[in-house]
Amino acid sequence: MPIDFVGIALLLGGFLALMFLRVPIAFALGLSSLATVFYLGLPPLMIAQRMVNGLNSFTFLAVPFFILVGNIMTEGGISDRLVKLADVLVGRLRGGLAQGNVVASTMFGGISGSSVADVASIGSFLIPAMTRNGYPAGYSVAVTVTSSVQGVLIPPSQNMIFYALAAGGLPISTLFIAGYVPGFLLGLSLMVICWIMAVRHGHPTGKRYEPREAVRVAANAAIGLFTIVIIIGGILTGVFTATESAAVAVVYALLATGLFYRTLNRAAIARIFATTLTTLAIVTAIIMTSSAFGFLLSYLRVPTLLADGIFAISDNRIFVLLAINILLLILGMLMDMGVLILILTPILLPIATKVGVDPIQFGIILILNLGIGLCTPPVGTSLLVGCGIARLPLEKATKSLLPFYAAMVVVLLLVTYIPALSLTLPTWFK
C-alpha cells in the first residue's frame, strides 16, 4: 500500500495546528485522530476501541498509586526532612547548599518519580534559601531544575510506566532497575558542576553538624525514605508487582505522614486526593487519545517513512542514535514529556532496535532526553515552575543553565553509547 501523505499531513498538521491554537493536548490528539479516521474512511468506532485499549492494562493501575504516594509525601513535609538530611551529608562541601540541593533531589526523586513535583516541593524551600545565602537567583533555579530530572530516571518513575505501555508491555521492574545508574551518574555530574562553580565564584560552605544532631536528622528522614525500600525492595524480591508495591507504599505513606510525622489533617488529605484526581484525569485522557493517535501513525506507516529517511542517509549505529537524540532534544523543548513518550515510542523504538539497541536501554535514552526537555525553554515545565518560585524571568535562568545542560548532554551521550550503564544492573537482578 502506498504511503498516504495527505493522511499524514492531516494527522500531524491537524495536531500541530490545534496545539498552536492552545487546545489541550488530549483534545488535540483526539480531534486530529478523528478527522483522519473520517478522511481514511475507517469506522469511527475504531477510535473508541483504541482509546479503551490504551487503558486496558494491569500495568496502568500503578500510575494512580505512584501519583498519590508522591502527593502524600509532598504534602506531608517529607521534602523538608530530605533537604536537612542532604545538608548533613554534603553541606560542609564547597557550595554545600547547591550540593545538598542535588542530593535532596536524588532522594526525593526516588519517592515522587516526578521532576515537576521535585521542583515545586524542594525548590519552594531551597531556591529562596540559596538566594539568601548569596547564590545568584538564576543559578539557584538552574541547580534545582536540572537536578530534578533525576526524578524521571530514579524509580519509581511514572514516565517509565508510560514507556512500558507504549513499548508493548516491557517489564516495569527491569526498567526501574535500569534507571538507577544513569540517574546517579546524572546527579554526580551535576555535583561536579556545582563544585566547579563554587570554586570559581567563591560559594560558601554549609555548617558542620554535631554527631548527635546528624543522627537525629537521619533518623527523622529515614521514616520517609523507607517508602523507597517498600517499592523497590518489594519488586526486586518478588513479593510485590510494581502495581502492588505502589498500593502498599500509599498505605505506608499515609501512616508515616499521618501518625509519625503528624503533618496531615483532613484538609491536607482532601487536597492530596483532589490533586491526584486532577492529575490522573489529565494523564488518563492523554493515554487514551495518544493510543488512537499512535495507531493511526502506524496505519499510515509513519515509522517506516521515518526509518527509511534515516537509513537512506546512513545505517551506521552511531549516526542513527545521534539523529534520534537530536530529534528528541528538539521535540522535548516543544511538547510535554508524557505525550512524547506515548507518541514517539512506537515510531522510534523499531528504528533503535534495528541498529541493535536493547528496548530497555532505549527507554532510558528516551526518558533522559525528554527529561532534559523539562529544563529547556520555551515549554520546559520544570524550568517554568522554578522561575515562578524565584520570580525570575526565563531568559535569566536560561543563561545559568548552560553548564548544567552541557553536563546532562554528556551523560546522555554516555548512556546512549555505553549500553552497560543501563543494562548491567537489570542483568544482575534477573
Image (tube, rainbow, N blue to C red):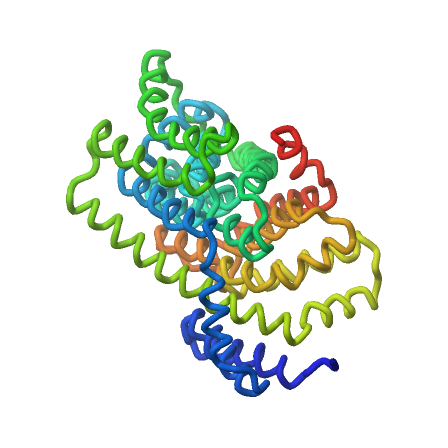
The one of 228 and 164 positioned closer to us in this rendering:
164
Q: Picture coordinates of residue 265 (x, y %)? A: 16, 40
Residue at the (59%, 85%) spot, across then down: 40
Left or right, residue 310 beside residue 103: right
Q: Picture coordinates of residue 106 (x, y %)? A: 47, 35
Position of residue 125 relative to residue 425, above or below, is: below
Residue at the (79%, 56%) spot, across then down: 319
Position of residue 180 relative to residue 402, above or below, is: above
Viewer can see residue 355? yes
Residue at the (62%, 43%) spot, across then down: 407
For the image, the number of numbered tags is 0
Left or right, residue 259 beside residue 20: left
Q: Picture coordinates of residue 41 (x, y %)? A: 57, 87
Q: Quadrant of the N terminus?
A: bottom right
Q: Picture coordinates of residue 321 (x, y %)? A: 73, 54
- Point out the residue furthest to the left here: 266
Residue at the (83%, 68%) spot, across then down: 312
Left or right, residue 175 beside residue 207: right
Viewer can see residue 203? no
Q: Quadrant of the C terminus?
A: top right
The one of 383 and 281 positioned closer to us in this rendering:
281
Q: Quadrant of residue 101?
A: top left
